[in-house]
Image (cartoon, rainbow, N blue to C red):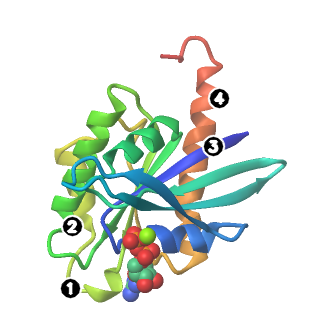
Amino acid sequence: MEWSILFMGPVGAGKTEAIRSLSDIDVVDTDVAATDETAFLKEKTTVSMDVGVLNLGDGDKLRLYGAPGQGRFDFMWEILVEHAKGLVIMLNHANPDPLKDMAFYVGRLKEMLAGRSLPVVVGVTHSDERPDRSIYMYAEYINNNPVTFATGKVPVFRVDARQRHDASALMAALAAMLEMNERLASVPHVAA
Ligand SMILES: Nc1nc2c(ncn2[C@@H]2O[C@H](COP(=O)(O)OP(=O)(O)O)[C@@H](O)[C@H]2O)c(=O)[nH]1
Ligand SMILES: [Mg+2]
């Protein structure tokens, strides 16, 4: 089986680094040509997106995609979200207001998924830079604002994207959720 996993989150949250830590192939930093329709001059510009592959054994693999930053390239997000089987929301714990970042991505994903649901995990990076700040606030946020498009609970992990071991924990959780969904889908009385 092959599953596409999409990493989303603000610039500097560690998307590229996590994909680099995980990928069994050299991460391709693709520059996708895009025409900027919104600019006064219709200049050609490029969107930077990371692509990696994590082999799970027995031919199973995860295709890892790092979404480009927010802004004019929303159309890329829609394509990536449409093909994703699992989502990682990466958050920079040292950002001024990471809960606002979380609310932004959860909100955009909800719009883009339009009723579809899939496994979601949250990876909180840069916690070493803000040891004074608890990471419990993310779980609390989810309790107060359920992530409606997530299948099951949304686990929150403290990760350092530079550490393969940390990034692997995110993938292990997602892979388990994906496998569980597939098994349940084959049991008629549990299927949605
Ligand atoms: N101190 C610290 N740096 C991190 C952590 N995770 C990622 N980084 C670094 O943060 C920077 C931004 O990461 P990057 O992957 O480029 O972010 P992206 O914009 O989401 O792709 C890089 O220099 C990473 O090595 C972490 O947990 N702690
Ligand atoms: Mg990046």
Inter-mark Cα distance, 3 to 2: 28 Å
Q: Residue type at mark 4: give it.
A: Arg
Furthest-right residue in view?
A: 58
Q: Secondary structure at mark 3?
A: strand
Inter-mark Cα distance, 1 to 4: 41 Å
Residue pointed to by mark 3: 3
Inter-mark Cα distance, 1 to 2: 14 Å
Does the numbered disc 3 mark a residue whose Cβ is under 8 Å from ligand 1? no
Residue 126 on image: x %, y %: 35, 80
* Residue ID at (72%, 67%): 25
Q: Secondary structure at mark 2?
A: helix
Q: Dividing the image into four equal quarters, which quarter contains ligand 2? A: bottom left
Inter-mark Cα distance, 2 to 4: 35 Å
The relative height of residue 13 versus residue 73 in the rendered view (above or below) is below
Residue pointed to by mark 1: 132
Q: Residue type at mark 3: give it.
A: Trp
Q: Residue type at mark 2: give it.
A: Pro
Q: Secondary structure at mark 4?
A: helix
Precedes in sequence: disc 1 or disc 2? 2
Residue pointed to by mark 4: 183
Other-residue count near label 1 (Cα within 10 Å), few / some / many at <14 / 14–19 / ≥20: few
